Image: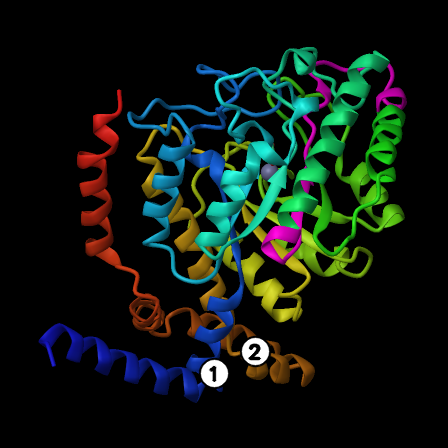
Amino acid sequence: MHQECAYMASSFKEAVEKYASYGVDVERAMDGAAKIPLSMHCWQGDDVGGFETPESVLSGGGIQVTGNFPGKARNAEELRSDIAEALKFIPGRTRLNLHAIYGDFGGKRVDRNEISYKHFKAWVDWCSQMKMGMDFNPTYFSHPLAADGFTLSNRDKSVRDFWIEHGIACRKIAEKAGKQLGEAVIVNFWMPDGMKDIPADLMGPRLRMKESLDKIFSVKTSGKFEKDALECKLFGIGSESYVVGSHEFFMGYVVSRGKMLTLDTGHFHPTESVADKVSSVLLFVPEILLHVSRGVRWDSDHVVLFDDPTRDLMREIVRSGATERVHIGMDFFDGSINRIFAWAIGMRSARKALLSAFLEPGKKLLQAENCGDYALRLALMEESKTLPFAAVWEEFCRRHDVPNGLKMIEQIKRYERDVLSARS
Ligand code: RNT
Ligand code: ZN
């Protein structure tokens, strides 16, 4: 055996024993962590630009990308090639999360209310080829009819109708894609609607938003191949004072309509724990969609890290036995660094957090808590933080045939040199 391999094998063996002494089965943890799909957001690849017009840029409210690192994908082929490259470094099951602006529009102007399955067929075929499920998002921003900050809650009925048609079109595309792929496509609704300064009427837009959504969902889908999720938000750029789709708005909406709630980790007050919300929300909604992100002081969508909030969140999903009811999507976009690295780092971090969640000494912790021995509980939590996780992660990557550490870095750097830097 090669010296490095022998070393890895022995450190993994030691790790297995160490975890076993805490009552943790490493093999089961690795299986559990690999099975959970992570939905990879296409929009990290081109700074949420999309392919509607040659030079479409993110505009019209609510979100912002900063940075101008060279080599962003300029068309669907480049984006697919970049996604495939990033996937080489991401162990475990993945899905692909598309936005409606990423269709193959053949250089023609196809407005948002006119999009249909044919514009996304190439993506669906590709997903099927890559053995990935798909998710979908209507795009309620970067459009002249979103420029005043209101889409589904706009006071102008014709604008609302346009966006209602867009929502329906997206659900139809998703339904067909789901049928094609044999598993449900989750359609996530996020609308930037809101106000920079203090509104006089908070009720009006919310009422209109509710009515518009009801119209969108009055078109029935199978429920088997298409599912709807709605994403709340605290505030956005240009909507600092008022967001129509607040947490209470969408919590009420999804509970009363039997839809999925989307929790984006950047969409709450910075000191709020999204991990804490999982067990409450799951009691009242059928399923949750997560947008795993990293806010730095605000909803800045920094690359996800293997940090405490991410670990807390994944641990909570595993602890509550809700891995089937919580769908994990990624939502970060950093245009200031190599975008392949951004995907790889962010998604690997989420996967690491899942693996470490499965490695928690859950039984021992519960026993301690049930006996009221809180010192023991705290000691176990702290001691388990320094168990040999790295050895398990390395083995996990090895089994999934994914380069790790410096090898990963070297390969992505090579792609940067050979492919990205050749794009002007
Ligand atoms: C914006 C929301 C939304 C978007 C994507 C691109 O604050 O988080 O999910 O990031 O739809
Ligand atoms: Zn989001």
Residue occupying the point 35% across, 87% down: 17
Q: For residue 207, which quarter of the picture?
A: top right
Q: Is residue 202 magenta?
A: yes
Q: Quadrant of ligand 2?
A: top right
Residue 114 position in % (x across, y down): 68, 23
Callout 2: helix, strand or loop? helix
* Callout 2 crowding tier (Cα within 10 Å): few <14, some 14–19, many ≥20: some
Q: In the rendered structure, which segment of residues is drawn in magenta? A: 179-205
Secondary structure category for the residue under label 1: loop
The percent coordinates of residue 176 (x first, y second) are 67, 45
Q: In the displayed structure, does residue 390 sit left or right of residue 132?
A: left
Numbered tag placed on residue 247 in the rendering: none
Residue 67 visible from this viewpoint: yes
Quadrant in the picture for residue 79: top left
The residue where tag 1 is placed is 24
Please tell me the numbered disc located at residue 362.
2
